[in-house]
Image (cartoon, grey):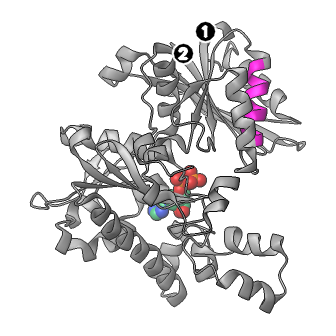
Amino acid sequence: MKVLVLNCGSSSVKFQVIETSLEMIEADTDRTLARGGVEKIGLSDSRLTLEVEGRKPYQEISEILEHRAAVERILKILVHPEHGVLADVREIEAVGHRMVHGGEKFASSVLITPEVEAGIEECVVLAPLHNPHNLRGLRAARGLLPDVPHIAVFDTAFHQSMPARAYIYALPYDLYLRHGIRRYGFHGTSHRYVAIRTARLLGRKLDEMKIITCHLGNGCSMAAVARGRSVDTTMGFTPLEGLVMGTRCGDLDPAILPWVMAMEELTLAQLNAMLNKHSGLYGMSGVSSDMREIEAACERGSRRAQLAMEVFCYRITKYIGAYAAAMGGVDAITFTGGIGENSIKVRAMAIAPLAFLGAELDGERNTHAPRGKEYVVSRESSRVVVAVIPTNEERVIARDTVRVLGGVMPSFAAPETAAPR
Ligand code: ADP
């Protein structure tokens, strides 16, 4: 079946058309027919892009004022006689939507019914910067494709299997009960996908493995995946917690916040901007939030870029140690995301101190890991396998769409280890 995957942000809609089915998932033969998106929605120079394998990328600049018009343009280009890949929009049999936050309501991907939509709406308070746009995209797509099923795939669902000891903050318990303040975790589709692929690459059973997955992109997070279930992850109530990221600080002494607000006379908005936009690699280095530029600055001898790199990698190393302890061991460590897949230096620096744990990189394999391929970068003798797996969140969304429709979607709920209410 052909599935349209949509990922809607505040001013963008990304899409893929993926041909998949339960048989194709099993045989790993599902494939992307087209990918692209609309950027700068709301401006006069919105950009529509379309990529189809074997063809020159297509792009078009025009005024696209809102999400419905963006989805409409996407559907139109998909059936374009010259540039498109479909003869008719009716070839699209289902739409898979990326939803950022499913709170405690959604521990699985689900068919979107009026009740589900109300549930997603209730989660807006937890992700005010993301869920409203995801919902806007859903409503636009449903208006244009009213006769096909729409499925929601949540960034948070995979981490719903975490035990309460991993997700409860040591704050007054009332805050959890009244406001749902707890750790949720994000990047769930990516962590789940690369864990499954790691087991497959090694020819082992996922439900017999302890895997630490490192998703390092502009946003960075790690997960401890034991027997196919997330038991801990670095992002928390919001994506700000945990690892150092491009512009986000990650873990912090919370007492710094009121202190710096008072000393610098910051407003709440300024504080938020400081933590989310002016920190991380960018804040420490003063150079860039982009790892390629940090690496180039390190080469030029910038001490602050080198320090930013050290802080970034040290935190990954620390969490690997923590997650090995959380799972009582580790069989594989997997790197993914723009940095995880491409930065030879980050993998080398993060893994170097872990020989004691049985994780040893093969310098040659790490340096020559082929781009875009699933690849083992540890030594033959390394007890812990270190792998690079390119992530593919759209593929998970398409696959989940098929799984939900086929009635075989697993749930990641863990009621037996849930917190008392
Ligand atoms: P997003 O989280 O927005 O999806 P990506 O997963 O594409 O982002 O990751 C972006 C990050 O990947 C940037 O920091 C970029 O510098 C880094 N990156 C991409 N290619 C390389 C490379 N060859 N070497 C080092 N870092 C890279």
Disc 2 target residue: 2
- Tell me, yes or no, whether the highlighted magenta stretch contains residue 136: yes
Q: Tell me the element at label 2.
A: strand
On whether residue 301 falls in the magenta region, the answer is: no
Q: Name the residue under label 1.
A: 91
Q: What residue type is labelled 1?
A: Glu
The answer to which quarter of the image holds residue 121 is top right
Q: Residue at x 36, y 65 (%)?
A: 344
Quadrant of residue 42 within the rendered picture: top right
Q: Which of the two discs, 1 and 2, labels the residue nearer the N terminus?
A: 2
- At x 76% / y 75%, what residue is drawn? 271
Q: Which of 198 and 293 is in front in this view?
A: 198
Q: Is residue 164 above or below residue 357?
A: above
Query: Left or right: 72 with respect to 337?
Result: right
Specify whether 304 is left or right of 30. Answer: right
**Magenta residues, as a range?**
132-142
Residue 368 picture location, percent across and down: 28, 58
Numbered badge on residue 25 = none
Q: In the structure shown, which secondary structural element does the residue marked by tag 1 occupy?
A: helix
Measured in 3D between alpha carbons, the distance from the residue under mark 1 to the one under mark 2, in whole angstroms, is 7 Å
Q: Residue 224: percent from the left, percent from the top? A: 36, 55
Q: Are marks 1 and 2 in contact (CB under 8 Å)?
A: yes
Magenta: main secondary structure: helix
Query: 167 or 349: which is nearer to us?
Result: 167
Is the residue 103 above or below the residue 148 in the image?
below
Badge 2 crowding class, 10 Å Cα cut-off, few under 14, some 14 to 19, many 20 or more, is: many
Please state the horizontal and vertical placement of residue 300, each as a whole percent of the image. Answer: 49, 84
Is residue 38 at least partly visible in the picture?
Answer: no
Amino acid type, label 2: Lys
Instruction: Give the side of residue 114 with respect to residue 17, left or right.
Output: right
Given residues 392 and 325, the one toward you in this image is 325
- Residue appearing at x 45%, y 32% in the figure: 411
